[in-house]
Image: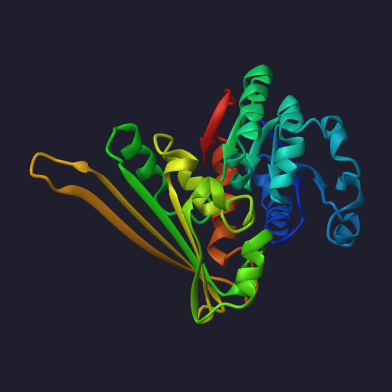
Amino acid sequence: MPLDSVPRRVGVVGFGRLGQSLVSHLLTQGPELGLELVFVWNRDIGRMAGAVPHSLQLQDLTALGERHPDVVVEVAHPKIIHDSGAHILHHANLLVGSPSALADQDTEQKLREASHRWGHAVFVARGALWGSEDIARLDAAGGLQSLRVTMATHPDGFRLEGALAAAAKTPGLRTVLYEGPVRGLCPWAPRNSNTMAAAALAAPSLGFDGVIGVLVADLSLPDVHVVDVELSGPPGPSGRSFTLRTHRENPAQPGAVTGSATVTAFWRSLLGCCQLPSKPGIYLC
């Protein structure tokens, strides 16, 4: 069944595991859903050879407006959002696959300004964050006091920078690499903090400075990403607080940054944002 009566033109930025999956879905299932793939861009153009029709390969990201997309999906790296997010919003709605980019306050501000200037929405994929709607509702109702997200996996699954990269090379069986505000983690783990960044966006009363992120290297987890979410509300009349803990185990190929279930969730995020109105602002999807 089509999403609506108006075809949606979709561009994909990035051709790693997520990008390849999205392109495949768009080429095989897109037409019956009213979705048309209009371009694919990747930093290494050669990676698309034989997998993406040449007519769909975009050589220059600054020329994306020539393809007239309705929504552009970023599944590359936070740097794309830093450098090109505002430009994309000039032409289309933006689905962000690297929400860690929004930990940079200047980047978030530029996206908000461009969104309002051009009337396009910034959608943020929830990725591996389980229960994002419930977190958002609790936060909006004033019932959220603390939120903590722990991600654990084998160190081969990390793509870290700076001091964290060195720490991950010589871990014990289970080593806490970082524990603190999510804003401080994102620059050092831009590809491994997206779940935590999504949580910070789901809970704006806490945000990147109030949501706590914990990154754990665990040698006993070669083929799974484990995400634990813990939250609590303010004390009630009895003195007790509402608390919730979720534990998510996402199978992953050894050394992979993205778990299997996250790939499926991202396709659903794209379908979801294509059914939402284009209005200024930042929204989880």
Furthest toward the front, the residue is: 163
Count of residue discs: 0
Q: Is residue 108 left or right of residue 51?
A: left
Residue depicted at x 55% and y 35%: 275
Residue 39: give x, y in percent of width and height. 81, 43
Residue 84 lies in what quarter of the image?
A: top right
Q: Which image quarter is the N terminus in?
A: top right
Residue 19 lies in what quarter of the image?
A: bottom right
Q: Is residue 83 above or below residue 45?
A: above
Q: Is residue 149 left or right of residue 65?
A: left
Pick the front one: 24 or 269? 269
Residue 56: give x, y in percent of width and height. 86, 46
Pick the front one: 277 or 166? 166
Residue 68: give x, y in percent of width and height. 80, 30
Residue depicted at x 75% and y 27%: 91
Residue 221: give x, y in percent of width and height. 51, 78
